[in-house]
């Protein structure tokens, strides 16, 4: 396993300030991968966290549904984009 201190982009704040990070985040394959991850993980999280509401025949507040899908989308996008930046700079 490599030492994380030796990897470029080890500082998330500095990485997000990098233009190449945002280019990588907006690339089609990054977006498609993040959407797939968000669909699967978001659905699982909705089922785990809102199963009682769904069983009772209700629907969770829309803001909870949106945020539940935004979190895995953001994590996946960050992971893929930071990996691309590190691969391209190293």
Image (spheres, rainbow, N blue to C red):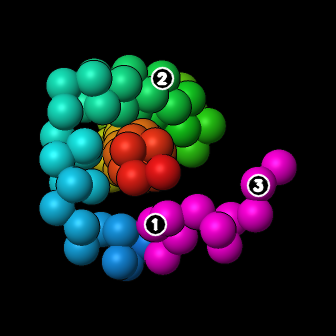
Magenta-highlighted stretch: main secondary structure?
A: loop
Decide if residue 81 is on the left or right side of residue 63. Answer: right
Q: How far across and how far down the image is residue 80, in percent? A: 42, 40
Q: Nearer the viewer, residue 17 or 35?
A: 17
Assess whether residue 6 is covered by the magenta stretch.
yes
Looking at the image, which residue is at 24% across and 73% down? 17
Q: In the figure, residue 2 lies in which quadrant?
A: bottom right
Residue segment shown in magenta: 1-11
Residue denoted by label 1 = 9
User: Which one is closest to the eye, mark 2 or mark 3?
Assistant: 3
Q: How far across and how far down the image is residue 42, in percent? A: 45, 34
Secondary structure at badge 3 equals: loop
Q: Are marks 2 and 3 in contact (CB under 8 Å)?
A: no
Where 4 sits versus 90, above or below? Answer: below
Residue denoted by label 3 = 2
Assess whether residue 88 is covered by the magenta stretch.
no
Q: Which mark is residue 60?
A: none
User: Cα distance, mark 2 to mark 3?
Assistant: 30 Å
Q: Nearer the viewer, residue 34 or 85?
A: 85
Dot 2 or dot 3, earlier in sequence: 3
Q: How far across and how far down the image is residue 73, in percent? A: 36, 41
Secondary structure at badge 1 equals: loop
Residue denoted by label 2 = 40
Secondary structure at badge 2 equals: helix
The answer to whether residue 75 is seen in the rendering is no
Looking at the image, which residue is at 17% across and 40% down? 26
Mark 3, residues whose alpha carbon is within 10 Å: few (<14), some, or many (≥20)? Answer: few
The answer to whether residue 85 is seen in the rendering is yes
Dot 3 or dot 1, earlier in sequence: 3
Q: In the figure, residue 4 lies in which quadrant?
A: bottom right
User: Cα distance, mark 1 to mark 2?
Assistant: 28 Å
């Amino acid at each position: 396993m490599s030492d994380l201190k030796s990897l470029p982009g080890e500082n998330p704040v500095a990485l997000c300030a990098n233009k190449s990070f945002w280019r990588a985040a907006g690339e089609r394959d990054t977006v498609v991968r993040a959407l797939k991850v968000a669909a699967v993980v978001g659905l699982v999280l909705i089922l785990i966290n809102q199963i009682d509401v769904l069983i009772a025949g209700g629907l969770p507040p829309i803001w909870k549904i949106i945020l539940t899908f935004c979190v895995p989308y953001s994590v996946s996008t960050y992971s893929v984009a930071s990996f691309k930046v590190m691969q391209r700079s190293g």
